[in-house]
Image (cartoon, rainbow, N blue to C red):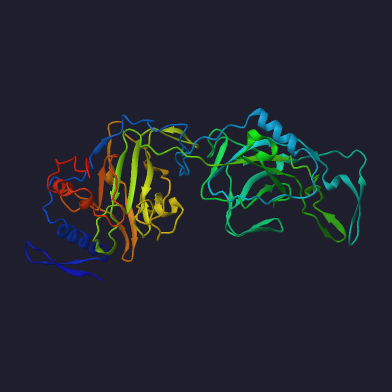
């Protein structure tokens, strides 16, 4: 359905689509609320930016998020490297026979790092190395003459999984939706590539309720491990926990009285040294916007607006035109590092569009009805970053206007892309990183009385210099 709107110039009746109604209502309310004319040259801080000088400006080993695929972490301190002393001390502690699992700890970390400590070098006999008596219930006998330990266990261990909610392992398969893959850990080791930094993989909004590895010998998941507090091993390891896995495999079944898949079965030895990893709680650097960063504040147009706090989303943008991807190496493409600072809206909102962008509440790990970092009872979260590819190829003399980054809101009237046009009411505004956004339900004109002066005169650019 549409509505009729009377034009002041010629009294025409114009029919608007539902999403156009939302823009129309917002603009009408904006003009009434601020009660002033808008400078026809008011561009709301959005100007063409030359990104030729921004190359590699935010490349920093102390920042997480270099991963091309996700890179959502941001500002994580690089964990301490596993030292030779640590590796040897932990291995010596684990290298003793224990005839039961130990899988209960008194922590449930959500943000933490997994670091490789030890790749086991033990070999085992698979069951094909034994003599068997066939029958309805085949009996295993002694080792065959010339039997050899033909299974290098840790080479079959990969795909570390962690549990962050309800879930279990049944018949060697993961049950439930709360299992999460810890990237970069394969063949009893880790690979500094996909999303690691200096050999550590960061788990965000995850959990430590259970651990498992995937065994490529029997194609099953196994949570056969013990977990030990570092303080129980050595005082210098306090604050860490160590997870040691014991290799075993079993895909045994009987067909016509003959045992099957004997080469996919291995007895455990109750030494939890086939693979050892360290988990450590995440520590973060305070967020400081790099030089050349721009801040965008926006209204999500909900309910026609009455507060105009411009905190429904607040995010920083840093452009880089020389971005590195795992598949292709360095490419002359335009990327933006987006750092989301606040989400004061309660509708799904996507920076970069729904297809290529990210939903801000999801990035913070909260529901869409939860407001983040806008005070007055809202949830407090660390800033979170991701990389948005804006263009796949560039000419050196090109410029970019941050107004082109789509911000899409899911509303009852359908998806709406926020608009800011010169000389018209602003649905999003570009400011400097010294700007401090409003609290929830705190009007921007009350926090910054000179905002109205800037609306009237685009040259009044220091309107937020003082509150």
Which picture quadrant has residue 394?
A: top left
On the image, the x and y values in percent for residue 188 come to: 68, 39
Q: How many marks?
A: 0
Camera-side residue of 40 and 132 = 40
In the displayed structure image, the side of residue 198 where residue 451 appears, left or right: left
Q: Evaluate whether residue 187 shows in this view.
A: no
Viewer can see residue 228: yes
Residue 456 as seen in the image, left or right of residue 339? left
Q: Residue at x 61, y 40 (%)?
A: 240
Q: Is residue 29 above or below residue 340?
A: below
Q: Quadrant of residue 349?
A: bottom left
Reply above or below: 113 against 26: above
As drawn, the residue found furthest toward the bottom would be 1
x and y, in percent, of residue 368 in the image: 41, 59
Outermost residue on the front side: it is: 235
In the rendered image, the quadrant that contains the N terminus is: bottom left
Farthest residue to the left: give it: 10
Q: Position of residue 407 (x, y in %)?
A: 32, 52
> Which residue is at 86% across, 61% downward?
256
Left or right: 42, with 179 as reference point? left
Quadrant occupied by the C terminus: top left
Who is closer to the viewer here, 2 or 241?
A: 241
Image position of 284 (left or right of 346): right
> Can you give x and y, in whole percent of width and height, for residue 230 in the image?
65, 39
């Amino acid at each position: 359905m549409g509505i009729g709107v009377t034009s002041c110039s010629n009294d025409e009746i114009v029919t608007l689509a539902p999403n156009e109604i939302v823009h129309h209502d917002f603009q009408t309310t904006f003009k009434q609320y601020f009660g002033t004319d808008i400078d026809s040259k008011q561009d709301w801080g959005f100007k063409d930016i030359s990104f030729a000088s921004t190359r590699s400006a935010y490349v920093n080993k102390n920042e997480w998020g270099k991963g091309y695929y996700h890179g959502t972490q941001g500002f994580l301190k690089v964990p301490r490297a596993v030292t030779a002393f640590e590796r040897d001390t932990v291995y010596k502690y684990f290298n003793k026979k224990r005839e039961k699992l130990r899988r209960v700890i008194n922590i449930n970390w959500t943000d933490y790092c997994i670091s490789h400590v030890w790749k086991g070098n033990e070999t085992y006999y698979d069951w094909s190395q034994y003599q068997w008596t066939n029958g309805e219930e085949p009996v295993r006998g002694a080792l065959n003459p010339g039997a050899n330990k033909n299974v290098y266990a840790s080479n079959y261990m990969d795909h570390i999984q962690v549990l962050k909610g309800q879930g279990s392992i049944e018949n060697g398969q993961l049950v439930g939706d709360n299992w999460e893959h810890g990237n970069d850990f394969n063949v009893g080791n880790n690979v500094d590539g996909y999303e690691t930094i200096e050999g550590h993989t960061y788990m965000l909004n995850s959990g430590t309720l259970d651990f498992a590895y995937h065994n490529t010998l029997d194609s099953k998941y196994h949570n056969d491990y013990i977990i030990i507090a570092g303080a129980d091993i050595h005082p210098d390891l306090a604050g860490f926990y160590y997870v040691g896995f014991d290799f075993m495999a079993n895909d045994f079944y009987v067909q016509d009285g003959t045992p099957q898949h004997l080469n996919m079965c291995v007895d455990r030895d109750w030494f939890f040294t086939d693979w050892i990893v360290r988990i450590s709680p995440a520590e973060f650097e305070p967020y400081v916007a790099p030089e050349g960063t721009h801040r965008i504040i926006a209204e999500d147009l909900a309910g026609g607006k009455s507060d105009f706090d411009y905190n429904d989303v607040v995010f920083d943008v840093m452009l880089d035109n020389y971005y590195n991807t795992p598949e292709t190496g360095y490419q002359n493409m335009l990327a933006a590092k987006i750092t989301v600072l606040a989400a004061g809206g309660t509708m799904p909102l996507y920076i970069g569009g729904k297809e290529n962008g990210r939903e801000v509440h999801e990035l913070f790990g909260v529901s869409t009805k939860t407001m983040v970092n806008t005070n007055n009872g809202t949830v407090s979260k660390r800033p979170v970053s991701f990389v948005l590819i804006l263009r796949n190829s560039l000419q050196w003399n090109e410029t970019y206007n941050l107004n082109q980054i789509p911000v899409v809101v899911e509303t009852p009237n359908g998806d709406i892309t926020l608009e800011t046009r010169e000389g018209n009411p602003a649905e999003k505004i570009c400011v400097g990183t010294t700007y401090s956004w409003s609290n929830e339900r705190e009007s921007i004109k009350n926090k910054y009385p000179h905002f109205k002066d800037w609306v009237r005169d685009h040259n009044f650019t220091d309107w937020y210099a003082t509150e």
